[in-house]
Image (cartoon, rainbow, N blue to C red):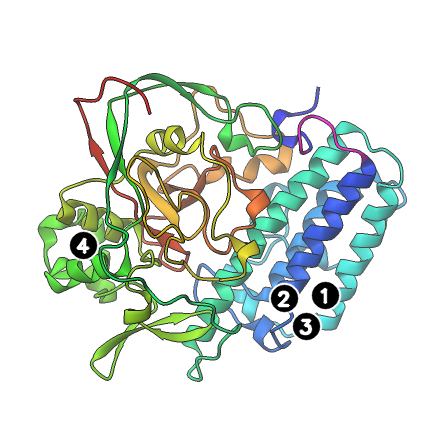
Amino acid sequence: MPTPALTALPGTEKSAARLLEHYRAVRAQSEALTVPLSAEDQMVQSCAEASPVKWHMAHTSWFYETFVLREFVPAYRDFHPDFHWLFNSYYRTLGGELPEKKLRASFSRPAHTLVMAYRKHVDAHIANLLRHTPEDRVAGLIELGLQHEQQHQELIATDIKHAFFTNPLHPAYAESKVQPSVTPNALRQEWVEFAGGLKQIGHNGEGFCFDNELPRHNVFVQPFRLATRPVTCAEYLAFMEEGGYGRPELWLSEGWEICEAQGWNAPLYWQMQGGAWQIFTLGGWVSLGQLSESPVCHVSFFEADAYARWAGHRLPTEAEWELAASAIPIAGNLLNAGRLHPAVDENEESPSQKLSQIWGDVWEWTQSPYTGYPGYQSLPGALGEYNGKFMSSQMVLRGGSCVTPADHIRASYRNFFAPATRWQFSGIRLAHDNVSVTSAV
């Protein structure tokens, strides 16, 4: 039996031709993201969480070479003898990796042209492998590689944004597509009520999933409410203006220490210029006034939690979030929309009893620590390092962002980052206990 988390999309079977088509589309999307970038741009690593774009392009090829071609093509020969360790990320089982992640930006060789030749080499061998119907495990590993590459597509966007922000010229990655904010209160926050009781969360068995989405299991939740939309920039500004960054009673202890040590006084990418807040986007600087009604982003878990306390609410649990999102079709401001920044809800009337912007715009912090579900089993071998070994000191985020591929996200998808992380497109949706609810929505 194939490992459930390696089952090919969409369901348990996918023809070799369809899998090859999917493979080529994902690989093309990665390369399309690099079109606005010079070879020099692709060498930059501007913060500890980020990696150079050139490294992303090589590492995603390394994944297929290491876990598919080396294992299932007897005549395969590595493209370059040093690439096996040079582009390993954190798979210690395989041996050989850079001693420090920060060194990824320290080497100008291999040249960008050689990295692209590496991609073509791997692509040719994968295509040859898929000319014949592969066994389930091979197809599953290729699918896993595609999902892995889509994660790196999101990282390319977040990493280059930080790189351009730290560049004193503050170049734009792409033409700005930021929409002007609508009039205040047009998108007033309301609440959707959900009943408590014994529920099930986790992947339902249809299509691909990562191992950390399994097994599907029972959870008991109390009645709760979720805000109809994410917290906006204008609402977050009110928190700032009321001294939110100077009130230790609102903050978790570790968060307050980090806030003080790093001098936080606003979300990442907010700067005061000429007496007014400006926000750096992938399209360059935009005034806060233009973004006031769009979801606030690039806040840490600690900031999200402090805001929720200030507002008199809390962050949702991941179980609450998944139960609320499961019936909502996947559509929204995702990578495919091309906006590359959180947008104002297109439905300006945003009717009550309806959740909006669940998908895309911003990853939504939950109050849930990232741990294994009851009965969790990691994948065998080196792939067991993909998710399981990070189940410590991380918090769960849900829903995808404006740079998440639309066919990559689902209700059971569990993203996770350290609670001080700000460079991701992470935002806030509020929750509240609702003990009076007796029927499900």
The mark nearer the N terminus, 1 or 4, is 1
Q: CA distance from mark 4 to mark 3?
A: 41 Å
Q: Are marks 1 and 2 in contact (CB under 8 Å)?
A: yes
> Which image quarter is the N terminus in?
top right
What is the secondary structure assignment of the residue under circle 1?
helix
Name the main secondary structure of what is drawn in magenta.
loop
Q: Which segment is the magenta one?
A: 9-15
Q: From the viewer's perspective, is the residue at label 1 or at label 3 nearer?
A: 1
Residue at the disc numbered 1: 115
Residue 14 highlighted magenta (yes or no): yes
Please provide percent x and percent y for residue 141: 70, 37
Residue at the disc numbered 2: 54
Q: CA distance from mark 1 to mark 3?
A: 9 Å
Residue at the disc numbered 4: 256
Q: Residue at x 44, y 80 (%)?
A: 170
Left or right: 215 as drawn, with respect to 181: right
Q: How busy is the neighbourhood of tag 1: few (under 14 within 10 Å), some, or many (20 plus)?
A: some
What is the secondary structure assignment of the residue under circle 3?
loop
Residue at the disc numbered 3: 109
